[in-house]
Amino acid sequence: MKLSTFRITTLDWYIIRKFLGTYFFAIALILSISIVFDIAEKIDDFMSKEAPLREIVFGYYLNFIPYFANLFSSLFIFITVIFFTSKMAARCEIIAILSSGISFRRLLYPYFLSAFFLFLLSIFLSNVVIPPANRTRIDFIHKYVSRPKYNDQYDMHKQVRPGFFVYMESYSPNSRIGYRLALESFEDGKLLSKLRANYVEWDTVSQKWQMGSYYIRHYTDSGERIEHGTGLDTTFYLQPSDLAHTDMDIESMNYRQLNQYIADQELQGSSYVNAAYVEKYNRVAQPFAAFILTLIGVSVSARKVRGGMGKHLGFGLGLSFSYILFMRFSTMFAIGSTLSPLLAVWLPNMIFAIVAVVLYRMAPK
C-alpha cells in the first residue's frame, strides 16, 4: 500500500466520529442503567450500615464506572459497529463509498483506527486504572455490603521458600489466629528442623507472628536437639493476606503485583494460580477482541438487506453473546486445571478470528 493510503481523510474522520461517538454514548447509557439497578439492589445495605454519601459516590460508584465500562467494552464495540454501519448501509452510504473507487479493505481503515484507540484505552484501564479502583471498591463492599468470603482457611500446606514448608490446620482471617502450626526446613532433601505450635497470632505492631507454646526439633549429624517454650516471635515468610484469599483479590493487583502473586502461588503449589493466570492473560486478550469484533461487525452490517438494522443487530447480538459464553466456559476449564490458561483465554479470539475472516470474504466488495 502507498503511504497516502494511510492518510486520514474526511471520510475517515466521519466514520471515526460515528464509531467513537456511538460507542461512548452506548457505554454511558448502560452504565447509567447499571448504576440505577445497583443502587436499588444495595440501598438497604447502605442505609442499615450508615454508609456516608461521600464514600458511596467517591469510594464506590466512581470506581464502579471504569470496572464495568471495561467489562462491557467488547460487547458494545460490536453493537456500536453494527448499529451505525447498518444505518450507513440503509442510507446507501456504503454503496456510494465503494462505487467511488474506495475498496472495502480501505473502508476498514478508520474502523481499525478506532478499534486501536479503544484497545489502548482498555489496556490502560485494565492495568493502571482499574486495579487500585477495584481495591477501593472491594473494600467498600466488604465494609458496607457483605463480609468477604475467604478461601484456603483449612489444612493449608505451602512451600513459602525453597525447602521451607508451612502447615496450618486452620486459620481465622478476622482474628488473624492460626491453629496447629508446623514449620519444616529441608536442605538437599534432608530435614533440618521441625517446629510445632498450638497456635500463632499476627501482631500488627511488630508485624510478626507470636506463637503460644512451641516445640522445635533440630536434626544434625550428631543427633537431635530439642527446644521448647511458651512464647516466640517469628516470621515465616507469610503475611495474613497470604493465608486467606478472596476471589476478588487478583482484580485489585497491577501487572507487577499479579506476576509476583503468580510466582508465590506456584512456589506454594496453590490451586488458585490458574485463576491468576487467567486474569493476567485476559487483560490483553479481552481488549484485543476489539479488532476481531470490529471486523465481524463491519462484514455483517455493510450489506444492505431486507429487515435492515434489526436483522443485523439480532445476528450481532447472538454472535457477541456466544463469544462471551464461549469465553466463560473456556476460562472455567482453565481455572479447573483442565485447559491451559493461555489457550483458554485466547481460544475464543482464535475461533472468532476465523469467523471474522470468513465473513470478511463474504462481505460486499
Image (cartoon, grey):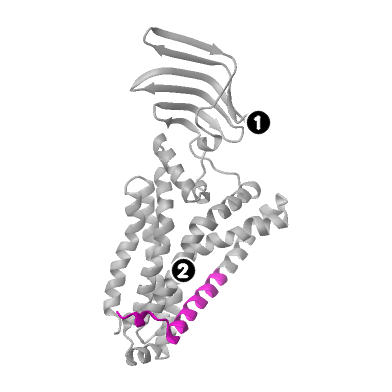
Quadrant showing the N terminus: bottom left
- The residue that appears at 45% across and 9% down in the rendered structure is 225
Residue under numbered circle 2: 118
Q: Is residue 276 magenta?
A: no
Using residue 153 as the reference point, say whether residue 85 is left or right of it: left
Find the distance from the CA under tag 2 to the CA under tag 1.
Answer: 46 Å
Name the residue carrying label 1: 205
Above or below: residue 54 compared with residue 236: below
Residue 234 placement: quadrant? top right
Q: Earlier in the sequence, mark 2 or mark 1?
A: 2
Task: Please provide percent x and percent y for residue 257.
Answer: 49, 46
Q: What percent of the width, then of the height, locates residue 286?
A: 42, 61
Magenta-tinted stretch: 1-30
Residue 321 pos. (x, y %): 41, 66
Q: Is 131 left, or right, of 360 in this rendering?
A: right
Q: Main secondary structure of the magenta part?
A: helix
Q: Position of residue 47 (x, y in %)?
A: 71, 54
Tell me if I can see residue 231 in this picture. yes
- Foreground: 335 or 18? 18
Q: Residues within 10 Å of mark 1 (few under 14, many from 20)?
A: few
Badge 1 marks a residue whose secondary structure is: loop
The quadrant in which the C terminus is found is bottom left
Tag 2 secondary structure:
helix
Q: Residue at x 39, y 85 (%)?
A: 307
- Residue 269 in sight: no
| Few, some or many residues within 10 Å of mark 2 (<14, 14–19, 20+) | many
Q: Specify the amino acid type for callout 1.
A: Val
| Residue 77 falls left or right of residue 36 | left
The answer to which quarter of the image holds residue 213 is: top right
Relative height, residue 154 to residue 342 (above, below): above
4 drawn magenta: yes
**What type is the residue that disc 2 sits on?**
Leu
